[in-house]
């Protein structure tokens, strides 16, 4: 028992989070990208089961099987279920809900929110992402660190902090092949 407490204390002291991505989700992405024109070394995961005020956006090293970066990410205002901690998801235009599934992170552009990345939905659950203008962008109300307050809500886009966006864009822009983003619940 003492060894377990020491190990937990060590992990907490070193800042290692207990949060992780299930091996099933990692395997699913590895199998999906295998032999395709996607980055085989990195993927981005969003675990919407984790509360919005906690790290739930993960840049993951598929070769070394480790999280290399983590951040706070928003979900859509339409995904909120009143008087519940549950979320709901949709692929429908004007639902303001986040969509689940695998996305190809496309080209960047400069728009209303500054630099943003187009997201192409690759599953039935997010196939309308381009039509819905679901993009990954930064927004000032998203915290860079975990906090007691939930993240502000989007219209369905995964929004990250301005500071973390600069970190994420280094991985995305330096990749010779498109990265996969996988949002799940």
Image (cartoon, grey):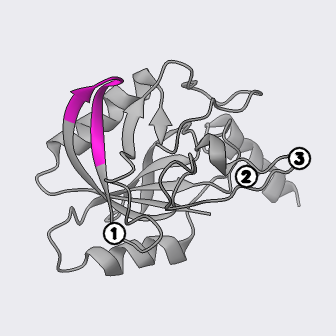
Quadrant of image for the C terminus: bottom right
Q: Secondary structure at mark 3?
A: loop
In this rendering, is residue 11 above or below 29? above
Q: Residue at 55% across / 26% down in the picture?
A: 142
Determine whether, in the image, residue 9 is placed left or right of residue 39: right
**In this picture, which residue range is highlighted in magenta?**
109-118
Q: Secondary structure at mark 2?
A: helix
Q: Residue at 57% across / 51% down in the picture?
A: 95
Alpha-carbon span between mark 2 and mark 1 = 40 Å
Residue 106 in the image: state x and y as whole percent.
Answer: 22, 50
Main secondary structure type of the part rendered in magenta: strand
Question: Label 3 belongs to which residue?
Answer: 83
Q: Earlier in the sequence, mark 2 or mark 1?
A: 2
**Residue 25 painted magenta:** no
Question: Label 1 belongs to which residue?
Answer: 122
Question: Label 2 belongs to which residue?
Answer: 7
Examine the image and state in which quarter residue 165 appears.
top left
Alpha-carbon span between mark 2 and mark 3 = 37 Å
């Amino acid at each position: 028992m003492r060894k377990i407490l020491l190990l937990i204390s060590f992990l907490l002291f070193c800042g290692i989070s207990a949060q992780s991505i299930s091996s099933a989700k990692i395997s699913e992405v590895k199998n999906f990208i295998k032999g395709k024109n996607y980055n085989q070394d990195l993927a981005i995961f969003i675990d919407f089961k984790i509360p919005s005020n906690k790290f739930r956006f993960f840049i993951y090293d598929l070769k070394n099987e480790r999280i290399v970066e983590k951040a706070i990410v928003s979900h859509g205002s339409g995904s909120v279920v009143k008087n519940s901690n549950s979320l709901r998801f949709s692929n429908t235009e004007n639902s303001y809900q986040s969509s689940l599934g695998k996305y190809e992170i496309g080209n960047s552009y400069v728009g209303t929110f500054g630099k943003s990345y187009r997201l192409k939905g690759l599953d039935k659950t997010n196939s309308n992402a381009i039509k819905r203008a679901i993009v990954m962008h930064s927004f000032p109300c998203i915290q860079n660190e975990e906090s007691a307050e939930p993240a502000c809500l989007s219209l369905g886009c995964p929004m990250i902090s301005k500071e973390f966006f600069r970190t994420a864009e280094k991985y995305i822009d330096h990749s010779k092949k498109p990265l996969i983003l996988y949002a799940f619940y």
